[in-house]
Amino acid sequence: MLLIVGCGDVGLRVARLVGKRWRVLALSSSPARVQALRGAGIVPLIGNLDRPETLARLAGLADAVLHLAPPIASGEHDERTVRLIHALARSPRLRRLVYASTSGVYGDCGGAWVDETRALLPGTDRARRRVDAESRLRMFGRSSGVTVTLLRIPGIYAQGREGGDPRDRLARGTPMLATGDDVFTNHIHADDLARACVAALHRGLPQRAVNASDDSELRMGEYFYLAADLFAMARPPRVSLAEAATVLSSMQLSFMIESRRLVNRRLKRELRLVLRYPTVTEGLRASPD
């Protein structure tokens, strides 16, 4: 039995992949989502990671947990993951846990190639919360014997995905950095990420981090130029870093000042995942669900 914590777009894609083999449960804080989850063949459990008294029933329910829930939006610690660990610590049957982390835990790497052995130097509180969650989950795995796999995930995209369809940003005309200031960015198609989650649930090694990224090697502006050309949309304007700081929000800017290229060797060799969309060109051309 699989419990998905934070069953949004990626969780639903995972459920479609495993639904014929596993019974899938999903923790949701929203009663309004119950019908949609049931329609997807998922057993909904109402609970809230911000209210630990609602989590007691999680103990003993599942053999595997897929933790997709984000931390709260402030601070440097992920108390939601702490509460989940406390709830699961009483589970006698739990064997595997996969956590959706972020490649932002590496911080700015100056465009260097980055594998999972690189020291973590998060540059934002958002990334520091993920480092905190990773550390706590690894300790939980070591103390409990549960196999914990950490997927370090870059930008998730797919046509029609809320927050992950490049056409939305192109339509807004959000500027890109000038070529001299531009940064390397990394991507994974939502379908390939769902398949990576399933592979990690089956083949992840104990307390192991895995870069869940495709093979693309593009700067951010190149990615959005490619998307604009594929969808016959206007290319975004280019501005200097100094200009960007005056027109973009601090969160938008934070994604545009960190540069790295992820090495995905473990994804392919250890999880044995064959990417359906090895580059964003194939992924952007794919029809939406």
Image (spheres, rainbow, N blue to C red):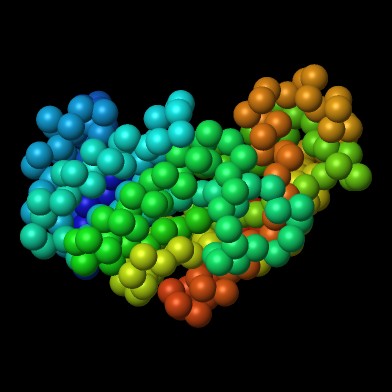
Occupied quadrant, residue 54: top left
Left or right side of 92 for 252: right
Quarter occupied by the N terminus:
bottom left
Occupied quadrant, residue 15: bottom left
Left or right side of 212 for 227: right
In-front residue for pair 165/126: 126
Q: Residue at x 40, y 30 (%)?
A: 72
Q: Residue at x 39, y 52 (%)?
A: 135
Occupied quadrant, residue 214: bottom right
Residue 220, image x and y in percent?
A: 75, 46
Q: Residue at x 23, y 38 (%)?
A: 83
Asked if residue 261 can be seen in this view, the reply is yes
272 to 138, vertically: above or below: below
Asked if residue 158 can be seen in this view, the reply is no
In-front residue for pair 124/101: 124
Residue 257, image x and y in percent?
A: 74, 40
